[in-house]
């Protein structure tokens, strides 16, 4: 899975360079997020603006990150959801669970 | 009156039971949705939803339905006729009781269990049964 990880404004940004987040690559994303928290990551933003498609396993990987952050009282936010991707969060009511920003810029200042 | 051949579509394909084929399967689903001319609503939405439904169904078949066919293939059947879209995904696993699968528990924030929720939400009817060709998850939707 193509993920660019960088530090910006004291936060760790994971930019997903994939059109799809499904059962083929969601396990890898879950591991990457988990590893960042284990290494002391405190404030993680997942930038999804290039992701056009997400399935239940993709949502599961992001939920894993959310729960991991909650256990550590750390920050975990999502940014740049495309309309179809956002609709999947709404269908599962997960938009009420995640901290979601329209784009990375707002997530960095939020 | 019988439907014209242009309004009938049948696809019967097999893909290796590997998750790297999900993208291809999803793309085929989107193309099928875009071939259907009678869609009155949002055709892009139907394409996305069919992509999702087929991705979830094939993922289930890969993860739970391989059985003794660990190196095998997954059969996918897609048809459209008289405004009825039918998707069947076959597996060779132990099978499961569809009725016993409940909606995900919002409060528990479970990481799993939303695949069938998506399928049930986006299709009109969903059935799972044993056949001579293996178990089949059959999903139907009227798209006119």
Image (cartoon, rainbow, N blue to C red):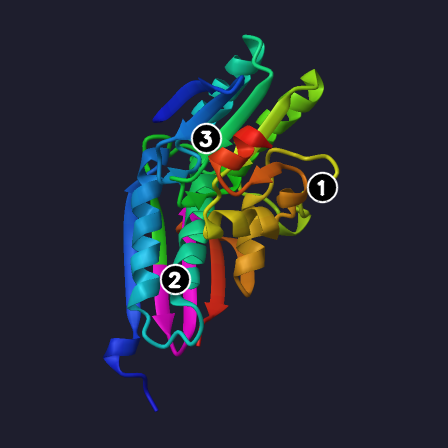
Label 2: chain? B
Q: Quadrant of residue B91?
A: top left
Q: Please tell me whether mark 1 sits on a helix, a strand or a loop.
A: loop
Question: CB under 8 Å between callouts 3 and 1?
Answer: no
Q: Quadrant of the N terminus of chain B?
A: bottom left
Q: Which residue is mark 2?
A: B44
- Total residue callouts: 3
Mark 2 vs mark 1: give the one in front: 2
Q: Is residue B84 magenta?
A: yes
Q: Please tell me whether mark 2 sits on a helix, a strand or a loop.
A: helix
Q: Tell me which segment is drawn in magenta.
A: B78-91
Horizontal side of residue A98 vs A79, given as left or right: right
Q: Please tell me whether mark 3 sits on a helix, a strand or a loop.
A: helix
Labelled disc at residue A73: none
Q: In terms of depth relative to the viewer, which is nearer, A31 or B4?
A: A31
Indicate the position of residue A29 as horizontal and vertical percent values: 46, 25
* Disc 3 and disc 2 on one polypeptide chain: no
């Amino acid at each position: 899975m193509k993920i660019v990880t960088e530090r910006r404004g004291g936060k760790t940004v994971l930019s997903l360079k994939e059109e799809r987040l499904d059962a083929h690559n969601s396990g890898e994303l879950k591991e990457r997020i988990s590893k960042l928290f284990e290494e002391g990551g405190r404030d993680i933003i997942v930038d999804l603006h290039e992701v056009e498609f997400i399935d239940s396993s993709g949502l599961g990987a992001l939920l894993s990150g959310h729960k991991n952050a909650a256990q550590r009282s750390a920050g975990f936010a999502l940014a740049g959801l495309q309309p179809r991707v956002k609709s999947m969060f709404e269908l599962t009511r997960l938009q009420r669970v995640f901290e979601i920003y329209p784009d990375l810029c707002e997530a960095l200042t939020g | 009156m019988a439907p014209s051949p242009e309004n009938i579509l049948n696809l019967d394909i097999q893909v290796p039971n590997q998750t790297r084929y999900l993208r291809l399967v999803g793309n085929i689903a989107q193309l099928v949705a875009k071939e259907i001319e009678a869609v009155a609503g949002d055709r892009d939405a139907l394409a996305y939803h069919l992509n999702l439904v087929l991705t979830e169904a094939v993922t289930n078949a890969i993860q739970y339905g391989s059985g003794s066919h660990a190196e095998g293939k997954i059969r996918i059947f897609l048809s459209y006729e008289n405004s009825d879209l039918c998707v069947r995904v076959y597996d060779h696993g132990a099978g499961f009781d569809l009725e016993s699968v409940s909606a995900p528990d919002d409060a528990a924030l479970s990481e799993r269990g939303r695949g069938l929720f998506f399928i049930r939400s986006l299709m009109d009817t969903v059935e799972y049964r044993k056949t001579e060709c293996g178990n089949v998850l059959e999903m139907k939707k009227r798209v006119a």
